[in-house]
Image (spheres, rainbow, N blue to C red):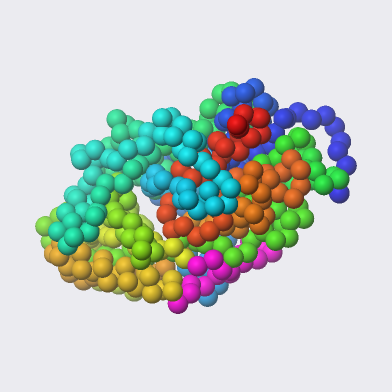
């Protein structure tokens, strides 16, 4: 229990600046609410460089985590905008029916977002030769391989560019930092290098947040707290605040990349995940996946394919992302303890065989696959388990809004879903839902 001291300066405190937190902060600040955004990471301008990305995206024990058994690498971005800085901007529709079965309808919010955000498949000139070759070959084999909807201001996007996952420096790929900047313009305060440690409560009500900045503990108070620290960060904060059932039986959207070398294309710099197909009945997604050369070299080195280390510009890459079973736990120190089930491994193996057929038909040789990678941790604070249908926890005034609230495994990029949940939550908090 914490006693409130001092004067409240804010109407709301939002912990985290990814799609969920950024959306709530933007919507509240538009209605003249005083909002404080606490972000663990920094706010440096995006340069689209490998060195900058390594600092916020692959720092061991912070932004880069390993599971315990299969040693899957899990990447998250600790920076203003969260993992949307590194995502590939793919705007899949939410799992409407699944969410509706839990009492959550976000169709209206998705319609609003599609009017507000630049969501559309890429123009032909922005799709690289490797993605085009994979799509053409997959269609020849009978797959319904299509262009995928992307969060992209296409007039700013550049062909022959590989900076999408490195933090697009051209403002072409929409990210949650853009909503944060709108919130700040509307009067919100962004406080960087501020790692929230727990929510302060009193008489079953959230009253403030404790956070650390440069090793010094601070507190701020507000009558409304929204935790949006992501699938790993949010359950850690919730547990420290007295919500002990957070952080169990979650999904991580594991993936592999399948690679093969061709002789008639020299590229390697293009927008990844431009095209693909959702094999819904088989439980996985297949897309092109032309990653930057340093990432490709890591993929080859981790499976000891040193003979392919320098073949990036001629290597076609296909990603297999599967809908994994709910299992595992987040440890007291933020570690990820989750292994792949037999079913999970079978789905990835099935996708691998399909990808090999596509690559061989495309003229590729030396085909191999990467090790497992975890993409979108979620389900750690599920609706009707940790939060209710309004995303409220057991404490009054304390809400959660990020991938952690999604109640079931889904297997697709969740950005549009989280944005819609953020808009829905903001309407609820502002008393605008009808």
Q: Nearer the viewer, residue 10 or 328?
A: 328
* Residue occupying the far left of the picture: 264
Q: Nearer the viewer, residue 248 or 387?
A: 387
Q: Residue 113 falls in which quadrant of the image? A: top left
* Quadrant of image for the C terminus: top right
Q: Residue 307 falls in which quadrant of the image? A: bottom left
Q: Nearer the viewer, residue 238 or 417?
A: 417
Q: Judge left or right: residue 312 versus residue 165.
A: left
Can you say whether 255 is above or below 265 in the image?
below
Residue 52 location (% of width, % of height): 46, 46
* Residue occupying the far bottom of the picture: 342
Q: Which residues are magenta?
A: 325-342
424 drawn magenta: no
Q: Nearer the viewer, residue 424 or 77?
A: 424
Residue 48 location (% of width, % of height): 39, 42
* Residue shown at the point (27%, 71%) measured from the top left: 353
Residue 161 visible in image: yes
332 drawn magenta: yes
Q: Judge left or right: residue 61 versus residue 148.
A: right
Residue 205 location (% of width, % of height): 80, 43
Q: Residue 256 falls in which quadrant of the image? A: bottom left
- How many numbered marks appear? 0
* Residue shown at the point (38%, 39%) measured from the top left: 151
Q: Judge left or right: residue 110 versus residue 135.
A: right
* Residue shown at the point (15%, 65%) measured from the top left: 361
Residue 325 location (% of width, % of height): 50, 67
* Residue shown at the point (72%, 30%) measured from the top left: 11
Q: Main structural element of the magenta stretch: helix, strand or loop?
A: loop
Residue 78 visible in image: no
Can you say whether 330 is above or below 402 in the image?
below
């Amino acid at each position: 229990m914490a006693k409130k001291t001092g004067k409240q300066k804010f109407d709301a405190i939002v912990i985290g600046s990814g799609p969920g937190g950024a959306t709530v902060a933007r919507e509240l600040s538009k209605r003249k609410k005083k909002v404080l955004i606490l972000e663990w990471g920094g706010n440096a301008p995006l340069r689209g460089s490998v060195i900058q990305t390594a600092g916020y995206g692959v720092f061991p024990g912070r932004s880069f985590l390993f599971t315990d058994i299969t040693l899957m690498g899990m990447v998250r971005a600790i920076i203003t905008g969260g993992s949307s800085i590194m995502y590939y901007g793919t705007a899949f529709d939410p799992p409407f029916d699944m969410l509706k079965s839990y009492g959550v309808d976000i169709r209206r919010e998705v319609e609003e977002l599609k009017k507000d955000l630049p969501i559309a498949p890429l123009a032909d000139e922005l799709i690289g030769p490797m993605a085009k070759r994979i799509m053409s070959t997959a269609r020849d084999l009978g797959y319904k391989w299509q262009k995928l909807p992307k969060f992209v201001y296409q007039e700013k996007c550049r062909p022959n560019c590989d900076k999408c996952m490195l933090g697009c420096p051209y403002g072409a790929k929409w990210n949650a930092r853009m909503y944060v900047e709108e919130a700040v313009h509307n009067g919100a305060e962004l406080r960087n290098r501020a790692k929230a440690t727990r929510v302060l409560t009193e008489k079953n009500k959230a009253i403030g947040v404790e956070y650390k900045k440069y090793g010094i503990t601070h507190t701020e108070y507000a009558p409304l707290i929204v935790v949006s620290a992501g699938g790993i960060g949010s359950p850690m904060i919730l547990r420290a605040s007295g919500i002990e059932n957070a952080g169990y039986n979650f999904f991580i959207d594991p993936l592999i990349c399948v690679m093969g070398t061709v002789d008639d294309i020299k590229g390697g710099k293009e927008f990844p995940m431009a095209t693909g197909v959702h094999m819904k009945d088989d439980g996985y997604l297949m897309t092109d996946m032309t990653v930057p050369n340093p990432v490709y070299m890591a993929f080859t080195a981790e499976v000891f394919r040193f003979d392919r280390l320098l073949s990036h510009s001629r290597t076609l890459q296909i990603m297999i992302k599967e809908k994994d079973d709910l299992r595992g736990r987040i440890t007291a120190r933020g570690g990820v303890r989750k292994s792949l089930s037999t079913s999970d491994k079978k789905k990835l193996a099935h996708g691998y065989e399909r990808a090999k057929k596509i690559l061989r038909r495309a003229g590729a040789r030396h085909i191999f696959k990467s090790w497992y990678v975890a993409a979108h941790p979620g389900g750690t604070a599920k609706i009707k388990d940790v939060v209710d249908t309004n995303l409220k926890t057991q404490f009054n005034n304390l809400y959660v809004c990020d991938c952690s609230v999604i109640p079931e495994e889904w297997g697709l990029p969740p950005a549009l879903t989280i944005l819609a949940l953020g808009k829905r939550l903001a309407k609820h908090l502002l008393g605008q839902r009808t």
